[in-house]
Image (spheres, coloured by chain):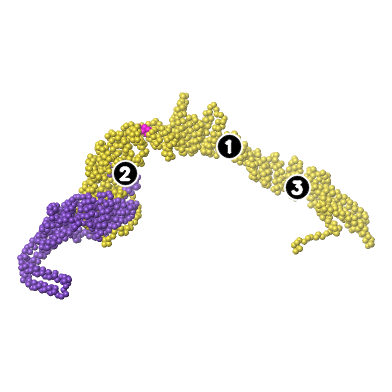
Chain colours: A purple, B yellow
């Protein structure tokens, strides 16, 4: 684990701790929910499944937390509040009434925590795997765990339980990669890719992306095996709009080069120039073009291509430096996440390569780092949270004003409230409906279509609500006063939370900015490396040119270590 | 959140892709082929509404064209690398740049400080790079390499112990690292450097035993050998070093390490040095042989000997070095390259200034590898091409050496001889012979070479000095004529000729005739060859002149002429030689009847103006020309040549003859005028010459032919008056008269004829003619009296010399006599028959008888025409008489009847004469039947036609031509 990654993780943990405090102090429906349990649980599950762990945490009351321990852990994990998770899981596992779904969730969390053995243990406790709701995901996680633990065979066996679908396709893809890197015989890898491809039949963006990755991997395996004629067709199947496209084009060029078709290789690499050079495959293509020219014997064009590469890298370095300065001056949030009109940012927003803006290109680059992706998401969630707090704060303000107004107008309104009249109108409505039902020709299907029963129920509800209203009106002022007090309290809480949240966002912004700048620095280092390699290539070429005119005096031992 | 597998995906790229592509591909593969996790969906940017695939891309249009490349120097490249090294942020690039800088500097031996980076600074930067990499995590997965680099850096800083420590760490921590082999090797190197040879040996052995690849095996083997050597394990070290050599099959039977890749050469060279040290520490080449015996082959014999040789040489152990080389030539003489060792032996002695041994080594070389050795016979053509120049150079040196020694000995001998002491003849001759033998071997070794001539000359000189004249002649000749272009060729050729004399003298007691003759012929051939090959040599004319003289004396004029002519063509000849050769040549040509050449020769000789020879040379010149004239088949040219004698040598004795002969030739070709001139000059200059009279005759002839009759006549008169030959004189006189006559100078002719008649009456024919000329002249002059006088003289002269009578004389005399009858006939005709008839008739009859008698005498001349004329005249006389009778005067008193009777009577009287006339005419006519016919016969017919027309006057019936008939 790299230092940067370690720092990222540490940052996230710190933030998580803050979040935890924040979340626990947030106004929650948990204690006061009055909606039906089924609906309540459904709402939480929906939020969980939607990955809105914060929202789900907000919804979860203590009872729910204790009764749905696994969901609670899942939400905490999802919201990066992982400090207590091991303890919580440990506690959960002691319970004897855990369902298969619970075991699945525990296994999943352990897997996501990089704890494969506990994960597998948890998965093993699932009694009826066939009826498991997340059967495909379960197979996927198990297989991945076995791969991580170095047993591709076990992974394969785990996948034999898969019924197909996208999860299985991904799993087989991963297995293929595992085979390809651990086994000299690439047949297993290719077989796994074939199965992955056969499972990946959905016409979704995600499936298409996986399909491209499968083709890329298969092509790569054949390329490594020096079977260029087999490799090239796979590369050709990769979609140009896919994120695999740059790598595909690059490797396609490589395969063509090795087939001896320097021109086609150069053309393939040339096509990559339409992609952002931030993608290393594109950068490599810039460096490979002169190599192909050199192999073709066009030395002057080789030089020009190196020059082109160097210029491109230099240009990109300028962009990186500009962006870094902007980040230093402002922050990630302002540059990447917020709509703003900062001077000097036009170039960043202007369309640069194909349809992508430079912003999009760098955004893509930054979020390719999973930690940063998480941080961006976290930032986004916090922003949403803040928005929500702001919203609630503003709502409370409005509510306060409304309550104050209500309080002022309450007496007048209470005198004007004519409950019997309203009840009469409701009853009249009920009478009309009854008459309508009794009319000749009113069939049951027609009655159903007119939802007469629903209307009748609604009238009943109206009566109840009228009754309730009458009670409220009766309690009116007292309630208004207490509500005003509660509103003020809540407002204070929200403001307090908002203040803390703002600080947290600012801290996160700072941390993310730093991380982004680090990543940018890494990109810069890579770009510098590319530039230097290009320069290195040029100098190699110069060296060849100079040596061709020199009489070799004497060849000594390798100069790198004498 | 954990979402991705972060274990590395190790990919193996195709081997042939360059390292730089390898690195980028690996990097990519890590990024691209990271296993997927659903939990972390990719960030997808929609860049296209219509998804297309890579295979759908239309190929980009790329123009391939090459442009002129910039001029780039190694220094420039180095500067770029240095800049890259200094500015690069990437540690790997920095380190790579550093490698390149070091390599280039070492490769091109660039010492410029501007192109140098201080090693300490390098190490510092490497260590900094290490820290940088460590801190950045960039090379996290290549920790082994980082450790390696730091080990290297510490090595640079001189901390070998630390280096070993780091390398140990690397090997321990990363046993599967690709750098392990090298690290193990570097560790061994470190131990070696620290002087811990046992550890070093063990570590090298580990490399050989446990390394993943054999990349460091060679160096390990090599250093293992060194380590064992350091541990004084000589035998083991030697065998180990031989193992190193065994790694390179290309070194089997190699001469040097050149066939090796350059980077391997230093190592092998040092390995050989180790072996050399080992041998030198023991018993040198003997140890070497023992080692070979122990390993069971001699695949590296040359290399080992060569290395040991060079080792000794570097240490100034020249004799040891030479012995090693010599040992090789003795033990490996079947090896083509043994000659190299022989050269080494020489080189070694030379470097060490062991002069005597050096010369012995050289003698050993030519003796061992010469053209008549088994070694040489085993060589192929290409190999011979290699060895030959070496042989040549050493043979040359040796030949020169012995030659110089010989000369020194000769000088010493001369000094000793002059002092009267006994000389060391044998030594001198032996040196000479040795020198000659080397020179001859040199020539043979060289083959066809322009230097051979000089060498052969020196060989011949040496042989001459050794007293071997016969061989020396042969070699001189070879020296002269095998390579005639060289500087000594002439001397050699000349020496060969001269040596014949020495050869002859060397025979004791004396050369026999047959041998002498053989030698003479050889010498002459030698001279000829000399002249042929060296026409411009200063010796050539004299040699040729001498040879020509010899031939001339032997009357071999052909050879004499030939050789002398050749001598004369030589520009460098001296005057005497030239004159002498000229004489021989001219005389020889004269003798060979090549007179034109002789003429030229003599003429040339006369230009030398040698008084004592002038007269005879002129005579010879005249004779040469005269002889040419004689030989000349074309007459007029011959004549000219005769005259040339007169022109060229006017006082030569042969000049009158030449003039005379010239005239004769002119006459032959009708060149009358030239003939007259020649004869005139002749007679004028040589009036008393025996041929004077003959010249006169020719002159007369020439005059006549040249239409100068008067001159001819005058010359004839001179002949007539001066010639003692009476006949000739008479003829000349007559001819002169005749010429005058013919040319209407009768006034001049007649006196001459008269003189002739008087002086030469016995010249019957000419005298008759002279008479006739007179008669004719006077006839023309109508001087009838003179004519009658000359006719009478003629008739009388002719009648008096009847015995000499010729048809001509008879005819002329008969005509003259016949014309003389006209006098009587005139008289007869003048007698008229008048009355009295009887008397007149008697008179007439008397006259008739007289004339008839004269006419009848003409028959004596037996000239048919004159006979016919006489017959006709007689007949005519009778007819005239008859007619005169009939026309005689009539008596006046006769009556008609009487007259008639008188006429009848006259007719009766006249008729017999008429009849007789007719009979006589008939005699002439009858001659026709005998085939004779002349004018007198014709006239006889005419008369007969009158007198008897019936019989003789016939009209000739002429048959008309057919044309007229039709």
The magenta segment is: B320-327
For disc 2, the neighbor class at 10 Å (few under 14, some 14 to 19, many from 20) is some
Residue B325's quadrant in the figure? Answer: top left
Pointers 1 and 3 in contact (C-beta within 8 Å): no
How far apart marks 3 and 2 lie (CA) works out to 129 Å
For disc 1, the neighbor class at 10 Å (few under 14, some 14 to 19, many from 20) is some
Helix, strand or loop for disc 2 = helix
Identify the mark at residue B107; answer none if there is no mark: 2
Residue B665 in the figure: left or right of residue B95: right
Residue A430 colored in magenta in the image: no
Q: Report x, y in % for residue B623.
A: 63, 39
Residue B551's quadrant in the figure? Answer: top right
Please tell me whether residue B324 is drawn above or below residue A286 in the rendered image: above
Q: Residue at x 86, y 50 (%)?
A: B856
Identify the mark at residue B738; answer none if there is no mark: 3
For disc 3, the neighbor class at 10 Å (few under 14, some 14 to 19, many from 20) is many
Q: Earlier in the sequence, mark 1 or mark 3?
A: 1
Considering the image in quadrants, where does the C terminus of chain B appear? bottom right
Chain ID at mark 2: B
Q: Are marks 1 and 3 on the same chain?
A: yes
> In this orientation, which residue lies closer to the viewer: B479 or B9?
B9
Q: Residue at x 68, y 40 (%)?
A: B686
Q: Which residue is tagged 1?
A: B559
Helix, strand or loop for disc 3 = helix
> In this orientation, which residue lies closer to the viewer: B845 or B414?
B414
Camera sees residue B574: no
Disc number lying in front (3 or 2): 2
């Amino acid at each position: 684990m790299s230092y940067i990654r370690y720092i990222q993780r540490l940052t996230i943990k710190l933030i998580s701790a803050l979040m935890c405090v924040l979340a626990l102090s947030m106004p929650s429906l948990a204690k006061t929910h009055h909606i039906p349990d089924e609906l309540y649980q459904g709402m939480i599950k929906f939020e969980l499944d939607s990955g809105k762990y914060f929202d789900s945490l907000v919804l979860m009351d203590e009872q729910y937390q204790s009764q749905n321990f696994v969901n609670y852990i899942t939400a905490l994990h999802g919201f990066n509040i992982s400090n207590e998770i091991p303890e919580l899981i440990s506690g959960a596992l002691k319970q004897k009434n855990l369902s298969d779904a619970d075991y699945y969730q525990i296994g999943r969390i352990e897997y996501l925590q990089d704890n494969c053995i506990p994960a597998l243990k948890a998965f093993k406790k699932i009694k009826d795997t066939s009826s498991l709701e997340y059967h495909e995901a379960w197979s996927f996680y198990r297989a991945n765990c076995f791969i991580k633990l170095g047993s591709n065979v076990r992974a394969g066996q785990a996948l034999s339980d898969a019924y197909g679908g996208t999860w299985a396709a991904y799993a087989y893809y991963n297995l293929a990669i595992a085979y390809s890197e651990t086994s000299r015989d690439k047949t297993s890898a290719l077989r796994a890719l074939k199965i992955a491809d056969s499972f990946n039949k959905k016409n979704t963006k995600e499936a298409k992306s996986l399909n491209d990755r499968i083709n890329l991997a298969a092509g790569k395996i054949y390329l490594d095996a020096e079977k260029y004629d087999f490799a090239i067709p796979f590369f050709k199947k990769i979609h140009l709009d896919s994120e695999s496209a740059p790598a595909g084009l690059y490797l396609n060029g490589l395969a063509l080069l090795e087939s001896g078709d320097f021109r086609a290789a150069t053309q393939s690499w040339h096509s990559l120039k339409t992609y952002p050079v931030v993608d290393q495959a594109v950068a490599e293509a810039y460096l490979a073009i002169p190599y192909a020219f050199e192999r073709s014997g066009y030395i002057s064009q080789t030089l020009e291509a190196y020059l082109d590469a160097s210029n491109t890298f230099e240009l990109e370095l300028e962009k990186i430096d500009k962006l870094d300065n902007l980040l230093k001056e402002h922050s990630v949030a302002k540059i990447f996440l917020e709509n703003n009109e900062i001077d000097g940012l036009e170039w960043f927003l202007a369309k640069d390569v194909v349809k992508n803006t430079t912003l999009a290109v760098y955004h893509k680059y930054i979020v390719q780092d999973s930690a940063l992706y998480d941080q961006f998401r976290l930032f986004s969630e916090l922003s949403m949270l803040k928005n929500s707090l702001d919203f609630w704060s503003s709502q409370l303000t409005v509510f306060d004003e409304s309550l104050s107004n209500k309080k002022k107008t309450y007496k007048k309104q209470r005198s004007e409230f004519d409950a019997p009249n309203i009840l009469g109108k409701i009853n009249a409505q009920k009478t009309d409906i009854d008459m309508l039902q009794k009319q000749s020709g009113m069939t049951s299907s027609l009655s159903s279509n007119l939802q007469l029963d629903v209307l009748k129920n609604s009238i009943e509800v109206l009566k109840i609500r009228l009754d309730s209203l009458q009670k409220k009106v009766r309690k009116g002022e007292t309630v208004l006063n207490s509500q005003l007090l509660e509103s003020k309290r809540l407002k204070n809480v929200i403001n307090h939370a908002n203040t803390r949240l703002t600080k947290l966002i600012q801290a996160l912004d700072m941390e993310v900015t730093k991380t982004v700048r680090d990543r940018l620095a890494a990109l810069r280092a890579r770009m510098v490396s590319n530039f230097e390699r290009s320069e290195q290539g040029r100098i190699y070429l110069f060296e060849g040119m100079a040596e061709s005119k020199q009489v070799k005096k004497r060849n000594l031992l390798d100069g790198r270590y004498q | 959140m954990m979402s991705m597998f972060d274990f590395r995906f190790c990919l193996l790229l195709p081997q042939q892709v360059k390292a730089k592509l390898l690195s980028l591909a690996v990097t990519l593969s890590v990024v691209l082929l990271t296993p997927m996790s659903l939990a972390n969906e990719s960030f997808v940017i929609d860049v296209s509404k219509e998804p297309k695939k890579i295979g759908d891309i239309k190929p980009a249009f790329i123009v391939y064209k090459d442009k002129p490349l910039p001029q780039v120097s190694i220094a420039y490249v180095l500067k770029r690398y240095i800049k890259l090294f200094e500015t690069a942020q990437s540690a790997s690039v920095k380190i790579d740049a550093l490698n390149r800088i070091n390599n280039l500097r070492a490769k091109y031996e660039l010492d410029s400080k501007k192109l140098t980076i201080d090693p300490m600074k390098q190490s510092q930067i490497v260590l900094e790079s290490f820290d940088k990499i460590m801190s950045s995590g960039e090379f996290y997965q290549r920790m082994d390499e980082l450790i390696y680099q730091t080990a290297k850096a510490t090595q640079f800083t001189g901390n070998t112990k630390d280096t070993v420590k780091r390398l140990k760490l690397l090997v321990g921590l990363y046993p599967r690292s690709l750098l392990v082999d090298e690290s193990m090797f570097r560790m061994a190197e470190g131990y070696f450097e620290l002087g811990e040879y046992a550890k070093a040996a063990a570590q090298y052995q580990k490399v050989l035993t446990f390394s993943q690849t054999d990349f460091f095996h060679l160096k390990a083997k090599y250093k293992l050998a060194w380590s064992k050597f350091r541990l004084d394990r000589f035998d083991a070290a030697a065998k180990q070093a031989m193992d190193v050599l065994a790694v390179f099959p290309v070194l089997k039977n190699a001469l040097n390490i050149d066939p090796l890749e350059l980077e391997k050469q230093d190592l092998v060279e040092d390995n050989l040095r180790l072996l050399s040290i080992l041998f030198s520490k023991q018993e040198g080449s003997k140890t070497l042989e023992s080692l070979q015996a122990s390993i069971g082959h001699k695949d590296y014999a040359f290399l080992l000997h060569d290395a040991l040789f060079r080792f000794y040489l570097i240490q100034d152990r020249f004799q040891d070095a030479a012995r090693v080389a010599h040992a090789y030539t003795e033990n490996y003489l079947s090896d083509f390259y043994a000659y190299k060792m022989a050269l080494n032996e020489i080189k070694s002695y030379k470097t060490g200034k062991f002069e005597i041994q050096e010369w012995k080594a050289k003698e050993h070389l030519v003796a061992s590898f010469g053209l008549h050795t088994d070694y040489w016979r085993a060589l192929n053509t290409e190999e011979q091409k290699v060895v030959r120049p070496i042989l040549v150079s050493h043979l040359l040196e040796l030949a020169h050496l012995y030659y110089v020694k010989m000369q020194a000995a000769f000088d010493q001998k001369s000094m000793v001889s002059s002092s009267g002491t006994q000389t060391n003849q044998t030594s001198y001759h032996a040196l000479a012979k040795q020198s000659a033998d080397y020179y001859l071997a040199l020539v043979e070794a060289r083959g066809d070479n322009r230097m051979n001539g000089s060498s052969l000359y020196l060989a011949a000189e040496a042989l001459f000095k050794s007293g071997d004249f016969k061989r020396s002649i042969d070699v001189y000749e070879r020296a002269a004529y095998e390579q005639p272009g060289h500087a000594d060729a002439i001397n050699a050729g000349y020496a060969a000729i001269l040596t014949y004399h020495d050869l002859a003298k060397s025979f004791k007691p004396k050369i026999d005739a047959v041998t002498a003759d053989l030698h003479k012929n050889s010498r002459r051939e030698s001279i000829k060859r000399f002249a042929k090959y060296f026409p411009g040599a200063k010796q050539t004319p004299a040699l040729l002149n001498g040879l020509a003289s010899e031939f001339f004396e032997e009357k071999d004029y052909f050879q004499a002429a030939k050789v002398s002519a050749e001598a004369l063509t030589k520009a460098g000849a001296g005057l005497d030689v030239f004159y002498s050769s000229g004489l021989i040549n001219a005389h020889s040509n004269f003798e060979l009847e090549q007179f034109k050449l002789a003429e030229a020769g003599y003429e040339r000789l006369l230009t030398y103006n040698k008084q004592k020879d002038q007269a005879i040379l002129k005579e010879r010149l005249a004779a040469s020309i005269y002889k040419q004239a004689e030989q000349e088949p074309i007459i007029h040219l011959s004549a000219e040549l005769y005259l040339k004698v007169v022109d060229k040598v006017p006082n030569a004795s042969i000049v009158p003859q030449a003039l005379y002969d010239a005239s004769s030739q002119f006459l032959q070709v009708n060149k009358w005028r030239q003939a007259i001139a020649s004869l005139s000059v002749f007679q004028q200059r040589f009036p008393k010459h025996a041929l004077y009279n003959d010249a006169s005759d020719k002159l007369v002839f020439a005059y006549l032919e040249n239409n100068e009759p008067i001159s001819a006549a005058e010359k004839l008169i001179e002949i007539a008056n001066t010639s003692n030959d009476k006949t000739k004189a008479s003829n000349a006189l007559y001819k002169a008269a005749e010429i005058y006559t013919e040319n209407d100078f009768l006034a001049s002719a007649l006196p001459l004829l008269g003189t002739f008649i008087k002086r030469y009456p016995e010249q019957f024919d000419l005298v008759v003619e002279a008479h006739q000329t007179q008669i004719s002249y006077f006839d023309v002059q109508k001087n009838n009296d003179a004519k009658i006088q000359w006719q009478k003289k003629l008739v009388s002269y002719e009648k008096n010399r009847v015995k000499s009578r010729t048809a001509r004389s008879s005819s002329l005399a008969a005509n003259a006599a016949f014309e003389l009858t006209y006098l009587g006939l005139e008289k007869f005709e003048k007698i008229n028959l008048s009355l009295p008839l009887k008397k007149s008739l008697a008179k007439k009859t008397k006259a008739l008888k007289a004339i008839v008698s004269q006419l009848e005498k003409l028959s004596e001349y037996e000239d048919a025409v004159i006979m016919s004329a006489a017959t006709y005249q007689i007949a005519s006389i009778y007819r005239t008489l008859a007619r005169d009778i009939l026309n005689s005067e009539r008596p006046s008193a006769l009556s008609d009847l009487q007259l008639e009777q008188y006429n009848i009577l006259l007719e009766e009287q006249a008729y017999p004469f008429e009849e007789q006339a007719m009979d006589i005419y008939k005699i002439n006519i009858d001659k026709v039947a005998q085939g004779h016919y002349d004018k007198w016969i014709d006239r006889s017919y005419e008369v007969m036609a009158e007198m008897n027309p019936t019989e003789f006057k016939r009209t000739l019936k002429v048959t008309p031509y057919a044309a007229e008939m039709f």
